[in-house]
Image: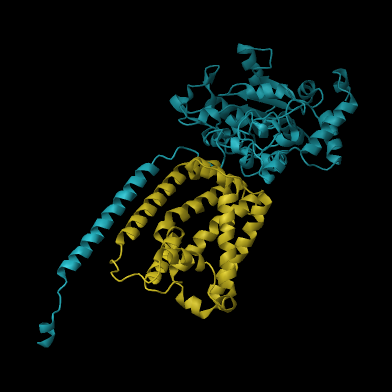
Chain colours: A yellow, B cyan
Amino acid sequence: MSEMQLLTWARGTGLDLAISIFVLGVLLRLFEIYSLGRKKDLSEPRTVSGASGMNTVFRRSLPPPGMLKNSPITYIGGYIFHIGLAIIVFLFAPHIKLFQDLVGISWPGLPSQLVDFATVLTIVAMLIVLADRIMKPVKRYLSTFQDWFTWALTFLPVLTGWMAVHHLLLPYTTMLALHILTVELLLVCLPFTKLFHAFTVFGSRWFSGAVNGHKGVAV
Amino acid sequence: MAGLARHGVSRRSFLKFCTTLASAMALPPAAGMAMAEAMAAARRPSVIWLPFQECTGCTESITRSHAPTLESLIFNVISLDYQETLMAAAGHQAEEALHNAIKDNFGKYLLIIDGSIPLGVDGAYSCIAGKSNLDTLKEVAKGAAAIVAMGSCAAYGGIPKANPNPTGAVSVSDIIKDKPIVNIPGCPPIPVVMTGVLAHFLTFGSLPELDKLGRPKAFYGETIHDRCYRRAFYDQGKFAKTFDDEGARNGWCLFELGCKGPVTYNACATTKWNGGTSWPVESGHGCLGCSEPDFWDAGSFYKALSMPASPLKTVAAAAAVGAAAGAAVSFANRSKKGAAKAAHETTTLPDLEK
């Protein structure tokens, strides 16, 4: 198989399979999670639970008092790589072209040098967050296989994409194929790992906030 | 030199040609002089050009070489003993010329092939003088010092090999394993690349440095995208969205219109075509990637590289299965909850007093 054939497979059959498994998995998990439901709380609500839910959605993106000082790497590293990932995925022109083809909508992108800068920051932040996880005994103790695995799943597409753009290690065609293949691996695994938080994070925050608000602990 | 002068090639234009070639191949300036001396002094080496399953586009391209008086130069520097399109001889005469060239220069001639070699139906899809291309290639390759696979068909199989490859087309390197082969892909290839490889062979007696796909690195070392004059617009995020919009008129990047420049290794962006007049991207059309293997089967020419190469066929079915499976799991969970609720035994006060 030539490099071009590998790239064409990744852009064709591979992408079709990966997106299919991704869509199947996401729908399955969303139905499963949101249909579970909870027992109806018969007590009279103490506060307006909806507002508390929305409040929690935003508040949980901020560190609780003292925590930023306590674990700066977790918070700052986390911010950088999440925002960096959003910039790379949603504001790089070739990626927008893919979204346009898949869902029919497009938006303006950023100059590639800015995306490149965000990519370098993301890579550095992810490496530091990984080093922190390895070096802090408590974090290391709490880490399971999935934590290391999902880090790699997220890191590889960023790294291969950046290396492709800069023609590092392998010819662009091969590296681009590897980049697309690692993204496909990420898509296949996302619904079935903790990476599914991309879909559930705000829902679960809203639910926690709403339940607490109902009990009178508006947070 | 005297011979060249008789044909109207001045010393100045000949040196200019050699220096251009040397610089095009990133050789040191002295190499230009060395080339001039070698090419002027050498006994004209025999070149046999065999056309197989091809469209003559490669020959057409070569005849439009832009280096000074290239046609006369190339036919004076080398002895082109067999080239069906350009030779005056035909039929038995042509065959005789071929066999004489093989006999007289055995082990020393340069063999140029354009076109792929069909293997289907015992090679019957393309025959010359009653012989299949496969047999001719094997026979003529035996006495060749080196082989040049001209154009994407000879280099990789090209368009004849495109899915579903009805003739069973293959490349030269699929058949010949024991000779040095240089691939000069392109549909057609750039004339100066061909003359550069010839000049290198005449001067140094060897083929230039090749990449993994057997292409001269001097010409195929960088991608179209990296050398494109529109690259700045790519970096700024300025793209033509259609072939006649504001962006297209402003000469913005053609990536979104399907340009395959990022994955295509060739020298079009630097050498250009037709005497440096223009090249595909300059004339407003994206690169097709014609110097890469299987470019014909690498998705639409008009779809960006980051878009799916083929329609997504299974996603809709997967969505339906996902939703159905999700609903089934929901019902299973609900009935489990219902069963647990039904099986729950309430504890009454008398129970506790027992």
Is B68 placed above or below A152 here?
above
Q: Position of residue A102 (x, y in %)?
A: 48, 42
**Which residue occupies 65% across, 33% down?**
B147
Q: Judge by depth and name the residue closer to the eye, A209 or B305.
A: A209
Left or right relative to B192: residue B295:
left
Q: Is residue A126 in view from this perspective?
A: no
Q: Position of residue A173 (x, y in %)?
A: 59, 45
Q: Position of residue A16 (x, y in %)?
A: 43, 44
Q: Judge by depth and name the residue closer to the eye, A184 or B121.
A: A184
Left or right relative to A2: residue A21:
left
Q: Judge by depth and name the residue closer to the eye, A82 or A127.
A: A82
Q: How many marks?
A: 0
Q: Position of residue B88 (x, y in %)?
A: 69, 12
Q: Judge by depth and name the residue closer to the eye, B110 or B161.
A: B161
Tell me the quarter of the picture where residue A76 sits: bottom right
Q: Is residue B282 in view from this perspective?
A: yes
Tell me the quarter of the picture where residue A128 sits: bottom right
Tell me the quarter of the picture where residue B145 sits: top right
**Which residue occupies 53% across, 44% down?**
A98
Left or right relative to A79: residue B206:
right
**Which residue occupies 51% across, 80% down?**
A137
